[in-house]
Amino acid sequence: MRGGQCVTPSGVVRADIGIRAQRIADIGDLAGAQAAEEIDARHLHVLPGVIDSQVHFREPGLEHKEDLHTGSAGAALGGVTAFFEMPNTKPSTETASDLADKVQRGREKSYVDFAFFIGASAANADRLGELEQEPGCSGVKIFMGSSTGSLLVDDPEVLARVLKNGRRRVSVHCEDEARLRERRSLVEGENVPVSAHAEWRDVDTAVIATKHLLRVARQTGRRVHVLHVTTAPEAELLADHKDIATMEVTPQHLTLSAPECYERLGSYAQMNPPIRGAEHQAALWRAIDRGVADVIGSDHAPHTQKEKARSYPQSPSGMPGVQTLVPLMLDHVNAGRLSLIRLVDLVCHGPGRLWGIPNKGRLAVGYDADLTLVDLAAERTITSDKMATRSGWTPFDGRKVTGWPVRTVVRGNTVMVDDSLIGEPGGAPVRFGEVGLSGETRSE
Ligand code: DOR
């Protein structure tokens, strides 16, 4: 690869990258070197392959919304070289054979590399320590509040058992189930506006769950990763618990805000936890600025347009996002909201660090040659018809952005160039480092 602006752990440097046997073999001035294939990156920035650590690709069981082929096609088209997929499929991913089945499907159908979460439940709580070590497992996922699917850990005793069993970082959807039940009447009856979603699943619903989780994490010494954080108080809490908890934010919570999104998009803006007002969004940006946020994940959660068109609250929660994560965030870089280096930390170095991935997430010799090439100056419009998701829509339809992924390379193989997929699916499971005694992940 010739002459790109490479975003390395030590800064942005103009360099050539030599790739051998799927790995980065050299970074620097390789003027005399010969290569079977040469990629001209002179006008581009070269990022380590972007890792999307939260997607719902719906297979098995919900393939009318998405599957590993369409979902991973969206990933490749969006500059994402690896994804971690959530367990609320049908059946939900709760056993070693559920996991092995998904890994096999991934090998057959995915354009990019992958791993799958195991869903915590009362039934598997005592076996999670073994299950999280299965090949292709990105760890345990807990739903503290009901969302799409039936996975739920709302009993404090089960939550404690889940955190006690196993050592890897646990990813958690923090909404308090008891409060959701108590407040459900707010959205019952005829003609309830979608904006009521954020009142029902209010700030306290999220804060109560996050506080409870942090208490149990302290008691058990287990590290936790709070998914799609949406509120200012949670961002503050997490700033005070950096030693034990990490924080994800999503592009949609950073980009859309209430009440405008509900007026414009109706139930297409409905997700859990909800899109909130400007004050909370500002807190998420502050968390990015202050180094409190650790990763950005898309929470790609597609539902068909027919399902979304049901009247609220029958409409399901969730929106697609894997293909728009990089374009939206590059646009925010161009708008001066964050630096490209910070973005790379959130979508490449961060996932590598949090999940202890020994060979991905960095532009460094010996690492997998996973590369996301972006044209920071490209002006494009995001449109639903260009989305690979089977659901066929994006909440960002019609949005003009500056900055676009133009080539996606997975272990040396180009899988996307100029908005077209290249070749056949060749994804492989992501490998994770050995787990140390304190719950810290150690790279090989
Ligand atoms: O809005 C959401 N949709 N939040 C979740 O937690 C799950 C997701 C889905 O799977 O649809």
Image (spheres, helix red, strand yellow):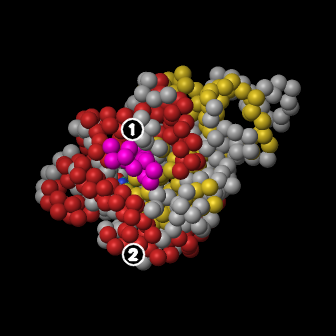
Horizontal relation, residue 254 to residue 15: left or right = left
- Helix, strand or loop at label 1? It is helix
Sequence-first tag of 2 and 1: 2
Q: Which residue is mark 1?
A: 287
Out of 142 and 75, give the one closest to the viewer.
142
The residue at 42%/33% (across/down) is: 289
Residue drawn at the location 43% of the way across and 48% of the way down: 242
232 versus 16 height, above or below: below
**Quadrant of the rendering where the C terminus is positioned:** bottom right
Q: Which residues are magenta?
A: 236-252
> Would you say residue 392 sits in the magenta stretch?
no
- Placement of 40 over or under 81, stated as above or below: above
Residue 325: x %, y % from top left:
47, 39
Quadrant of the picture in which ligand 1 is shown:
bottom left
Assign the N terminus to one quadrant of the image: top right
Answer whether labels 2 and 1 touch (C-beta < 8 Å).
no
